[in-house]
Amino acid sequence: MLAKKYHPDINKDDPQAARKFQEVSAAYEVLSDESKRQQYDQLGSAGGFAEASAPGGGDAGTGQTWQGFQSTIDPEELFRRIFGDINLGKGRGGFSGWTFDDFAETNAGFGSSQEVIMNLSFQEAARGVDREINVNVVDICPRCNGKKTEPGYKTVKCPFCDGTGMETFSQGPFIMRQTCRRCRGTGQYNKNPCLECEGTGNTVQRRNVVVPVPAGVEDGQTVRMTVGKKEVFITFKVAKSDKFRREGADIHSDVAISISQAVLGGSIHIPGIYEEIHLQIPAGTSSHTKIRLAGKGIKKVNSYGYGDHHVHIRIKAPRWALRSLSDRQKAVITVYAEMEKDTEGSIRGVTSTADGKKIAVEDPDGCITKIRRVVNSGLQPEGIGKKVAEDIDELKTDT
C-alpha cells in the first residue's frame, strides 16, 4: 500500500512524499492499463517508455529517466481506485473522513437499535413469557417501498455513462475507463429520489414487537431476533426471588417445620417453580437436611429436561418459643426431657438425681407429675391404674 504510505495529505512533514507518490502513481498507471503495459514491454526500458509517452515523442536514448515521467492520473483518483469508492469527503475537503450525511446514508441509519435490555421477574424467566417491546429498526421505506424513487417516478438511464455503468475519458494520449461515479456502475440514475428515505430505500422505524422469552433464561443471557432488516440483540435482566435461589437449571429453597414434624415425620405443601409440591418429611429429620426433588427445577434452555429442586429443612425453634407454650405443652416437653438419654450438658428446669435420673425442679400445679404417671403407666405391662385414669381425666378437663 505504497500509495497510502506516501500520500501527501498523510505525510505533510515529508518533502519527498509528493515525489514518491508521483512515482507510485506512474507505476500504477502502467500496471493498470493494458495499452501502456504493452508499450512498456515493447520499448523494454523505463526511460524509453517515458520518452515515448511524453508529448512530442523522441528517442529512447535522449537520456530521459523513469523519474522524469509524469503520471496522467489524478492522485486522489488513484487513491480512490486502490482503496475503493468509500465516499470520502464527497467533494468537501478530500480525505476529511465521514460526514454527517455519510452516516445518514449507511445501513444503520439514525437511532437503530442493536441491543435491548429487557427486565424480567424470576418467575417470568423460569416459565417463559411473551413480552412486547418498542425498538428502532431499519426496514424498507414505507413511502417508496424500497424502490428509492418518489412514488410515480422511476430511475432513468444514467446520462453520465449512457447506462453502461462505466465512464470513458481521455488522459493525454490515453483512453481511460472506470466505474461511473454517479451511478456507481448500476447504469441507472435516480433523478427523483424518495423524500422519506433520501433515495436509500430504507428508513429507521419505531416498531412494537412481541419477544417470545424462552423458559429458563438466565440473568445476563442474550438472544438474537430479526426485526425488519436488522438483527436485534435482547439481553435479559432477571430479578432475584425471595423464595428461590438459582444455580443453572437447579433451584434451592428453604422450608421451616415444627419440632414434632422433625421428630415424628409428616408432610408439608411448598411452592415450586411450575406447581405446588407436596413434600414428605421423614421421621427424625434434623435441621439443615437437604431433600432433592429430581426434575422439579427450571427448564434447561440449551438441552432437554429440567433441573432439580433442592429443599433445605429448617426446624422452627424461635427464642420466644418458651413464652408461646402453654403450661401443659411445657409439662409435656419437661417429661420428655426427663426421659431423654445421652444428653450433653444440662436442660433448664431439669436436674439430675444421685442415681443418674433426671427430674423436673418445679411442678407447682402438679401437671408434670400427672403427665409423668400417664407416660410411665403406658410403659407398664399391667397398663394404667385407677390413679392414672384419674390423672388422664384431669388433664383432659384442664384448660
Image (cartoon, rainbow, N blue to C red):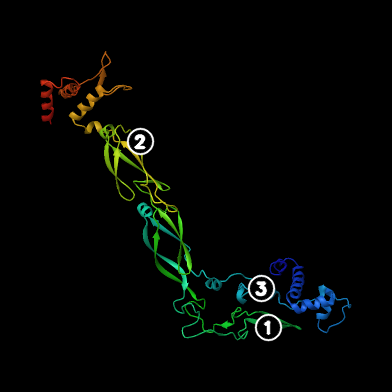
Q: Is residue 213 above or below residue 247?
A: below
Considering only vertical position in the picture, is 61 above or below 111?
below
Q: Which residue is mark 3?
A: 80
Residue sitting nearer the eye, 107 or 214: 214
Looking at the rendered image, the quarter that the N terminus falls into is bottom right
- Do we see residue 60 in this rendering? yes
First of labels 2, 1 by sequence position: 1
Q: Earlier in the sequence, mark 2 or mark 3?
A: 3
| Residue at point 20%, 30% (across, down) | 329
Residue position marked by numbered label 2 in the rendering: 289
**The residue positioned farthest toward the top in the image shown:** 354
Q: Position of residue 180 (x, y in %)?
A: 63, 80
Locate the C terminus and report the quarter of the image it occupies.
top left
Q: Calculate the distance from the C-alpha at mark 3 to the C-alpha at mark 1.
A: 16 Å
User: Quick one: label 3 or label 1, which is nearer the N terminus?
Assistant: 3
Local packing at callout 1 (Cα closer than 10 Å; few below 14, some 14-19, many 20+) is few
Which residue is at the front of the view, 52 or 288? 288
Q: Which residue is disc 1 drawn over?
A: 168
The amino acid pointed to by label 2 is Thr
Could you tell me how many numbered marks the image carries?
A: 3
In the image, which is nearer the foreground, mark 3 or mark 1? 1
* Mark 3 and mark 1 residues within 8 Å of each other at the beta carbon: no
Circle 2 crowding by C-alpha within 10 Å: few under 14, some 14–19, many from 20? few
Mark 3 neighbour class, 10 Å CA radius: few under 14, some 14 to 19, many 20 or more: some
- Residue positioned 18% across, 20% down in the render: 381
* Residue 160 - label: none
Q: CA distance from mark 2 to mark 3?
A: 75 Å
Q: Where is residue 356 drawn, in percent x and y? A: 28, 15
Q: Quadrant of residue 261?
A: top left
